[in-house]
Amino acid sequence: MTESTVTSESSAVRVERLSFRYPGGPDVLTDISFTIAPGEIIGLVGPSGAGKSTLLQHLNGLLPSQLPNFVGHVSNVPHVVIDNLPVARQTIAEVRRRVGFLFQDPDDQLFCPTVFEDVAFGPLNLGLSDDEARQRVRDSLASVGLAGYEPRSTLRLSLGERKRVCLAGVFACQPSVLALDEPFSSLDPRARRTLIGILKRFPGSQIIATHDLDVVVDLCHRVLLLDAGQLRAAGPTADILSNAALMERHGLEVPWRLRGEHTNG
Amino acid sequence: MHIQDGVLSPVVCAATGAIALGAVSYSVHRLKQSVADRTIPLTGMMAALVFAGQMVNFPIGAPVSGHLLGGVLAAAVVGPWAGCVAMTLVLFVQWALFSDGGLFSLGANVLHMAVIGSWGGHAVRLFVQRFIGDSHKGIVIGSVIAAWASVMAAAALFCLEFRMSWPPSEIDFSKVFTLMVSFHSLIGLGEALITGIAISFVLNQRPELVADAASVRQADASCVGHGSAITSTLVAGLVFALAVAAFLSPFASSFDDGLESALSQMGIADFNLTGRVPGVLEGYEKVPVPIAAWQTFAVSIAGIGGTLAVFVLAWLLGKALPAATPNLNSEAAGE
Amino acid sequence: MCHRWPPLAKLFAAIAMILAATCVPIAHGPLVGIVACVIFFAHTLARIPLAYVARRLLFFWPPLFLMAISLPLSQAGQKGWLMFMTILVRGTLSFSTALWLVNVMPFDQLLATLRRLRVPDVLLAILSLMYRFLFVLWDELDRMRTARAARLFRKPSLWATWRSAAHLLGRLLIRALDRADRIHGAMLARGWDGRSRWIEQPREDRP
C-alpha cells in the first residue's frame, strides 16, 4: 500500500523498506517506505502502539539499531535517507543536526535549569561561537513568540510554554526537517492554536505524529496511516481521513471537519 | 543521620572534608574515564531520585518515621563511582536548598553516606555475592547486608569523629556511643529493609536496570585486572571492621586515655573549649547518670539483635539461603 | 537588599559567618553575641521573616538536641552542659546563616557561581540535571502517592506500609531511569557528545 511518487532527488526524507524490532521482541516496524518532499507537512496517524514514535526516532537516529554496539538485523541498504544523506554511524551527527526532534513530554527535552541554557545547548554542541549561539537563542525564542524568556527557570513554565521552549531549542539547531511526537497532547486550545501557528511558519518539511486529527486536517498536506507497525495507507489528507471504513478499521475516527463531505468511504 | 554544623570541631571538619574531597575527586575521575555519553543524564537522574526518594516516609511510630539513605541503592544501579558522586550532590543540594546538614560538616556527611554508602556498600555487596552468586537472590541478600553494614560503619566513624571533636577529659564517651550505636542499629535495619525491598522490586520488574551494575563490575575488572577484586575485598573488610567497631566503641573507654594523650600532644583536644566556664552551670555537677546501667545491655541488644535481624531479613528477602551463609555470618557479625 | 549583592560576595559572606559561628568559643559570651548580631542583621537586611526562621528552627532543633543532650546525660558536671550549649549555639547560628544564603541566593545563581569557582564541568552538568529533575520527580512521587492513597480503604499493617512505600520507591526508580534514557536521547538529538559546554547568559537578560 506504499507509494513513492516523489523522486528521490528532491526528497527531504526518504524511508525505504525499514523494519525494526527490539532484540528478542516482536516487530515494531515492518517494511515501511515513504518519502517527504521539501516543505511538505506529513501527518502520521494511527492507534496507540502502532509504532509512530519508533518510526520518528529512526529519522533522528535515536534507536539502538543505529548505535555501534547494536546486535540485531543489519543490512547494507540505507533505510532512512535525509537530504540525500543516509542515516548511518558516520553521518549521525549531521543527521541529528538536520532533523529536529520534539519529544512528547517536554520534561524529557528541557534538561537545563534556565531557558537560555536549554536553547543554547544545541548551538553550543554544534560548535558555534558564543556570540552566534546567543544570537541563535534570541532568534529562535522570538520565532516561537517567547522573546525575553531567556532568564526564566524551566521549572516555572506552563506546558504550552515548555513545548514552545523545546521547539525553540530545536529551531536553534536550524533543522531542515522537523519530527514531532504528539506535539498537541494535553495542550489547552489557545496553546494548541499558538503551536499550530508556529508550525505553519516553519519553512522546512515536517512529520507530525498525532491523535489530533483536526490539526492534521488543518496542517498536513499528506497523511501516513500506521497500524501494528505497517504502513496501511498514504495519500492526501482529505482522502485518507474522510475514508470512514479505513479509519474505523484502524481504530480512528473521521474528524468533525470532514464529516458530511464523504459520509461513506 | 545528617550531622549539622557545630556538632564536630573545626579540625575534625577539615580532616573529614579533605578525605571526602579526595574520595569524591577520585570518583569524578573514574566517572570521566568511563564516560559514555549516557553517564551524565543517568547520574543526574539517580541523584534526583535519591533526593526525591528520601521524601518517601517509612512510618515507625506515630511521630517518628524513617527514610531511605540511598548509597547502596545508587551504587547498585549506576555503579560505585557514579553512586558516590550522586550521593555527594544529594547532600550538597540538601544543604544548598533546604539548609539540611551543614556546610563544614558536609565532608563528614559525604564520607558517611556517599563514600561508605556507595563505595563501601558496593564492595560489601560484591563480597557477599562472591559467596552467594550473582543471581537475583545474591543481589538482594548482598544489598541488605551492605546497607546495614554501611550504616553501622558510618556510625563507628561518627563515634570516632565525635570523640575527637570534644575534649574527653571529663566525658565518658562510652555512654554517648551507646546511644548512637543503638540509634544507628535501628537506622541500619530500616535502610537494609528499604533497600532490600526496593531492589527486589526493581529486579522483579526490570532486572536489566540492576544487572547493569554487574557489567560495570566486569568493565572494572577488565580495566584493572584482578586488582579490583582485591580492592573490593579490602574495602568490604574495612566496612565490616568499622561495623564491628561500632559495637565495640562503647566499651573502648580504656582506649580513651591513650587516644587522649595523643590528641592533646598534637594540640587538637583542647581546641574548642577555651575560656572560662560560666558559674551558672556549676550546680549540675552531680547529676546522676541515667543510662549507665543500660549500656552493656543496650549495646548487646543493638549488636546481636541488629545482626540477627539483618540476617533474618536477608534470608526472608532471598527466600532460601544457599549453604555458604554461615561463612558470611562469621565475617559480618564478628562478635 | 542582600539579594542584589554579587553572588560571590554572598557565598563568601555566608562561609565566613558559618566559620565564625562554628569556631566561636561559647564561654566568651560577647563574641557569641557579636556573631549572633551579625547574622541577625544579615537576616534583617534580606527581609527574611522572623516567623519563617522560627518555624524552620522548630524542625531543626529536635535532632540536634538529641545529639547534644547525650553529652550532659552521660556525664555529670558542668562541662557536659557546656558542650551541650556549644553544640546548640553553634548549630543554631550556622543553620540560620545557611537559611540566609538559601534565601538570598537562588540555586541557578549558586550554580553559576560554582562554575566561576572552577568546579569540574562534569559535576556541574550532573548537578544542574539533578536540580532540574528533582521537581519533576517530586511531582511524579506526589501523583503516585495520591493514587496509592485513593485505593487505600483501611489502615494497612506496618509491614504492608513499608512494603508499599518501598515499592513506590522502586517504581519511582524505574520511571526515573526510563526518563534518563529519554533525556539522553533528547541530548543526543541536539548534538550531545558527552562534553558539556556552557556560555554566560548576556548580562541584560539577567533578572
Image (cartoon, coloured by chain):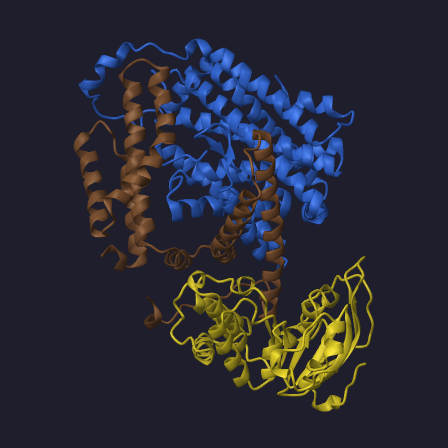
Chain colours: A yellow, B blue, C brown
The image quarter in which residue A103 lies: bottom right
Front-lying residue, C127 or A235: A235
Front-lying residue, A62 or B26: A62
Res B89 visible:
yes
Give the farthest residue toward the left: C30
Residue in the image at 63% along x and 74% along y: A96
Residue B242 drawn above or below residue B201? above
The image quarter in which residue B3 lies: top left
Res A99 visible:
no
| Residue C72 image offset from top left, x and y in percent | 33, 18
| Residue A45 image offset from top left, x and y in percent | 68, 74
Indicate left or right for C206 with C1 as reference: right
| Residue B302 image offset from top left, x and y in percent | 54, 19
The image quarter in which residue C39 lies: top left
Residue C164 drawn above or below residue A15? above
Indicate left or right for B224 with C124 as reference: right
| Residue B128 image offset from top left, x and y in percent | 69, 32
Residue in the image at 49% along x and 42% along y: B55
Indicate left or right for A221 with B5 as reference: right
Front-lying residue, C85 or A18: A18
Residue B325 drawn above or below residue B79? above
Number of marks in the rendered image: 0
Q: Quadrant of the C terminus of chain B?
A: top right
Residue B186 drawn above or below residue B74? above
